[in-house]
Image (cartoon, grey):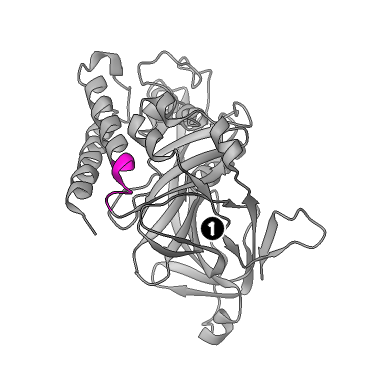
């Protein structure tokens, strides 16, 4: 695998992400407009991503285009409502992990959560929205990948009580295993009208995907919740809000593969995506045990929604050239569709795109 040029580009992305993150303090954000180097850093990041995606196929990789949910499709959410914030946290933190069948550590990670790019798993580097879907573009090493892990975060949640040790055979007899790690989240409770609105768009922080350090479109709601959090911290300083501690859970689901796909060197492939439903998975709560710092439970069933993709639909989304990524645009011109092999079964009486592993 020709790693030299690819590694250099990944290092540039990591350096930019660190510098950009440090440009946004957690208190009163300093307007980006006052930072003369911000535009230059964004241009450098854009050029680095464009080169990485544009040359990935020549570097021995494949390009995968795969849809996830467009979080902007439902319109603006009321982030002052705690239940809305918590549901959005789960949706925006979910990553669907397709793991390489033979090479441990190599994976395809799909979703809106923060992703630290590394050589075995670069994650989504560009995305473009179309209706209810957001198409993500991911550089992938050749091989067979299986969708067998999902990770996400839940606020205002606690793991089930674990009352006994569970035989391994009983765990393995179920669909999969959930590792539930307790956390403590900081949230904010509004106590007076806020002088700094979460919806304001002229605060100097940038817009959409630029704000959340991602290229493409479909980041407006992620930017809005970022602004809500910034507004909440300001309101806290001005005694218009109080900080509260709420329990949370980091969830990692490991299960028998729901789907698989094989990618070859030099290809550009469009395939179908999958998302976890909000009320999933169903845990076997009588099969939970404590292990180190987390609770492990057997998974009774997992229901996911298949997101069918098509070349026609993808071509109607804003192209990479729209976002000043000409090399990426050129690398996707000969994109082909390939359906994944699906192992989960359709839910009885439901949509054919509702699939259940059980």
Residue closest to the far right? 349
Picture quadrant of residue 347: bottom right
Identify which residue, 74 or 306, lies in the foreground. 306
Question: Residue placed at 31% from the left, 48% from the top?
Answer: 117
**Side of 162 relative to 236 (left or right):** right
Image x and y of residue 16, in percent: 23, 35
Image x and y of residue 337, in percent: 55, 49
Identify which residue, 276 or 325, lies in the foreground. 325
- Asked whether 238 falls inside the magenta stretch, the response is no
Pick the quarter of the image with the N terminus. Answer: bottom left
**Side of 9 relative to 230 (left or right):** left
Question: Residue placed at 41% from the left, 44% from the top?
Answer: 124
- Asked whether 54 falls inside the magenta stretch, the response is yes
**Side of 107 relative to 12 (left or right):** right
Question: Residue placed at 60% from the left, 45% from the top?
Answer: 309
Above or below residue 2? Residue 328 is above
Instruction: Determine which residue is flagged by label 1.
Output: 158
- Label 1: how many Cα within 10 Å (few below 14, some 14–19, many 20+): some
Question: Residue placed at 27% from the left, 54% from the top?
Answer: 119
Image x and y of residue 120, in percent: 31, 58
Pick the quarter of the image with the C terminus. Answer: bottom right
Q: Is residue 85 visible?
A: no
């Amino acid at each position: 695998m020709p790693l030299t040029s690819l590694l250099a580009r990944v290092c540039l992305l990591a350096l930019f992400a660190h510098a950009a993150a440090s440009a946004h303090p957690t208190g009163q954000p300093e307007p980006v407009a006052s930072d003369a180097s911000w535009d230059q850093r964004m241009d450098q990041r854009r050029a680095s991503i464009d080169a990485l995606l544009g040359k990935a196929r020549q570097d021995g990789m494949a390009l995968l285009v795969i849809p996830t949910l467009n979080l902007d499709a439902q319109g603006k959410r009321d982030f002052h409502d705690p239940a809305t914030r918590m549901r959005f946290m789960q949706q925006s933190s979910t990553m669907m992990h397709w793991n390489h069948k033979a090479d441990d550590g190599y994976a395809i990670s799909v979703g809106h959560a923060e992703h630290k790019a590394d050589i075995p798993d670069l994650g989504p580097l560009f995305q473009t929205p179309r209706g209810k879907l957001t198409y993500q573009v991911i550089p992938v090493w050749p091989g067979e990948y299986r969708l067998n892990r999902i990770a996400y975060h839940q606020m205002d949640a606690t793991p089930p009580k674990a009352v006994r040790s569970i035989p391994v055979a009983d765990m393995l007899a179920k669909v999969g295993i959930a590792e539930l790690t307790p956390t403590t989240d900081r949230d904010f409770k509004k106590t007076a009208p806020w002088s700094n609105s979460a919806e304001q768009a002229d605060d100097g922080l940038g817009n959409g995907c630029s704000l959340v350090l991602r290229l493409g479109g479909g980041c407006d709601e992620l930017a809005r919740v970022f602004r809500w959090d910034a507004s909440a911290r300001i309101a806290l300083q001005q005694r218009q809000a109080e900080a509260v501690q709420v329990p949370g859970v980091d969830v990692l689901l490991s299960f028998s593969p729901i789907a698989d796909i094989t990618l070859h060197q030099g290809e550009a492939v469009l395939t179908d995506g999958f998302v976890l439903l909000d009320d999933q998975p169903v845990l076997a709560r009588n099969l939970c045990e404590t292990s180190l710092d987390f609770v492990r439970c057997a998974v009774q069933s997992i229901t996911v929604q298949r997101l069918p993709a098509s070349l026609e639909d993808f071509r109607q989304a804003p192209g990479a050239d729209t976002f000043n990524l000409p090399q990426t645009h050129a690398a996707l011109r000969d994109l082909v569709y390939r359906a994944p092999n699906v192992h989960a079964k359709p839910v009885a009486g439901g949509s054919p795109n509702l699939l259940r592993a059980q």
